[in-house]
Each structure stands twice: as structure tokens, then as C-alpha cells.
Image (cartoon, rainbow, N blue to C red):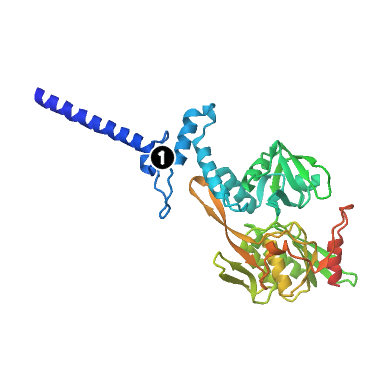
Amino acid sequence: MFFMKDLLKNINARIVLIVVLSFLLGWQLGHRDIQIKWVTYRPTISIINKVPPEKINLDFKLFWDTWDLLSRSYLDKKNIDPNKLFYGAISGMVSALGDPYTVFLPPEQQKFSKEELNGSFEGVGIQLGFNKDKRLVVVAPLSGTPAEKAGIKPADVIVKIGDRDTTSMTLPEAVNLIRGAKGTQIELAIFREGDSDTRSFTLTRDTIIVKSVEVSERQTKSGKKVAVVKLSRFGERTEDEWNEAVSNLLSAQSQALVLDLRNNPGGFLDGAVFIASEFLDGGTVVLQENSEGEKLSFKVTRVGKLTKIPLSVLINKGSASASEIVAGAIQDRKRGELVGEKSFGKGTIQESQDLLGGTGIHITVAKWLTPNGRWVNDAGGLDPDVKIEGDKEDSTKDPQLERAIELLN
């Protein structure tokens, strides 16, 4: 009996000794100039999945050493949030591509993104983008929102959000800072072309309900009935709202149509194809070009109800992405004239994917071209057929709309 106990003690001692020796050996190897992969890391937290992607030959020891060093040495331990470090690392990896539209979205930002496309969120009503200098800009203020009422304009450069400088800020970070609970305030420092200094805007957040489609009726000088269809986005509810609007204008026996795409920042690609198909009698709406230079043609998907009605299209510097796809197709196919100002010039396509834990990612997967092969990034936007600026002195006047209606006379 005592012999068995002594034997077990010896065996246990050997097991412990082997474990200790293995640990020391791993520690020594880890501090030499030897490539040590994931298996040698001794994390301070529990790592569920440590398997690197296939065909990626990288030494992640530097990453884990840095993580471990922060965990042990950083002064304010309560600010060490493993999830924030984790999401920040992924965001840094994605932003290293240098593409402001390829972004990783932590759970809250992913939620904001989906709310916006669904047409309801709390904020100030600003659609954001980047200019050619990769500075954060206003693509468009949404109609009837705190941003529009305060006088925010398309192409305004947002220099600061609160006390945060926006240089190198990602789009999701900016959205996260500007969004917030109804009734709270956010201060924006804005630089506008022609100004010598920034302007300060204090905006009170509200619930933003965005209706994609609005219809009004006008007349030409000759008495022709003109339907003015304001399309503000390409979101989840756009198709249903559009079908209802088309039924109404047909019932009203409208004789011509102005499609107002001003300050429309875009949305879903298939939504753009759906809208363009209403006006085009077959053929190509948009071309998609991948990284290999291969082109895929997106053609008209249905029989449109408005293929014969006289048409003018309004654009400005706030017309971007999907709205440029529609406008570009109509211009190339000579279906109607573009009236207004040069558009924003965003010619890339992002694929949106849901990831684990409520996160998501937007990845630039292709660029889009008009049916004639034009890329708006090269041209800095679409040039209108009839160039006319808005009235900057009197917001009650709309010379662009008046000109579009006049063309239909």
C-alpha cells in the first residue's frame, strides 16, 4: 500500500516536472529569434479560436506579445476592454487597405447601418462620405431633419465632431459619434468651400424617419401635368414606396415626370437596377467590374410602366452611388436629360456581410460603370446635360426644378 502511494507520488512528481520543463522550454523558445506560431502563446484571457487562416504564413507572436504587454503594463486597468481591443485590431487591419468605404462594424455601428437602410434612426439626418482628399464630408442632409434645418449643405467638410478631429476617422466612427438619443446635442465644426474659417453648428438629435419616395404635382407653362418624384434613398422600403408612387401618378394621368435624385446618397445596388428598369425599355443599366477587369452586365429586370413618359432627372453634388447609377444609365441610354450640378462621384460597390457577435463588414468588391463604360470616380461625378446651380440666397426658390420642368414643356 505504501509502495503504491510512493509510486503514485513519484509519477505525479514526474508529470509536474514534465509540465514545468515544457513550460520553461516554451518560454525560452519564445524569447529567441525563432518563428513561434499561435500554439506557443500564453494569453492572459481565454482565446476560443487560435487557428490562423490557411496559406497565411505570418508570425502572430508580435500581436499577442503586444496584447499581453498592454494587459500587464497599462496604467488604467479598468480601460482595458478585451472586446474593444479585439474590434480595434480588426478595424485597424481593415483600414490598412486605405479604402474609406471598406470598414469593419462593431455591434453598435452595425445596428446603426441597418437602421439607416431601414429608414428609421435617431440622429441629425446627415449622410456621410469622403471627398477626394479623404476628408469626411456631408454627402447630403436628409429632408426635414435637424441637419437640413440648421443649414448643413452637401460637400461641407466636417472638421470636428464634438472635440474629436475627423482626420483619419472611419465612416462608422463618425456615424457612431453623430448618432445618439433623441433630445441630446452634438456640435459640428464645418468648413465650407469659399469660407476662410470653420463654422460651428450645434444640432439637437431627433428620431429620423426617412421616406424614400415623395410625389408632388406641377404644371408646365402650356398646362402639361408634371409629376415630381423625389427619391431620397435606395433602402429596404424603397420598392414598395416606389410602386405606390407610380400607381398614384398614373392614376393622376401625369403627362411628364421629373425624377429628383438630389441629395440621394445611394443604397442598394439592386434598388438602383429596379428604379432604372421603370424607365428603360430593356438593355443594360450598369456594368460591374471586378479586380480582374471582368465585367458583369446588370440589365433591365422588368417591364417598366414609365418607359415612354417624357423625363428629366435632377442631380447635384449630394447625388451619389446608387443614384448616380440610375442617372448615368438614363443619360447614356439617352432616355432623359440630367439637370443641375455635377454629382458626388462614388463609383465603387460594397458588399455587406453579417459577422459573429452582431458585427459586420462592408467590403469594396467591385467598381461600377455606366452602360457606356464611364467610371464616375475618374470624372469626379456625372456632368449634367443642363448645368444650373441652386439658389443659394433664397431657399424657397428652386431654379433647377423650374428648368427641369421647362425642358418637358
Please give left or right for residue 385 compared with residue 293 in the image: right
Indicate the position of residue 3 as horizontal and vertical percent values. 9, 25
Name the image quarter holding the C terminus: bottom right
- Residue 270 appears in which quarter of the rendering? bottom right
Instruction: Report whether residue 317 is seen.
Output: yes
Say which amino acid is labelled 1: Ile
Please give left or right for residue 78 compared with residue 251 in the image: left
Name the image quarter holding the N terminus: top left
Q: Which residue is mark 1?
A: 47
Q: What residue lies at 64% left-to-right and 74% top-to-bottom?
A: 284
User: Where 74 falls versus 372 (above or below)?
Assistant: above
Q: What residue lies at 53% left-to-right and 38% top-to-bottom?
A: 84
- Residue 161 appears in which quarter of the rendering? top right
Instruction: Report whether residue 244 is seen.
Output: no
Q: What residue lies at 82% left-to-right and 42% top-to-bottom?
A: 197
Q: In the depicted view, which residue is nearer to us: 245 or 357?
A: 357
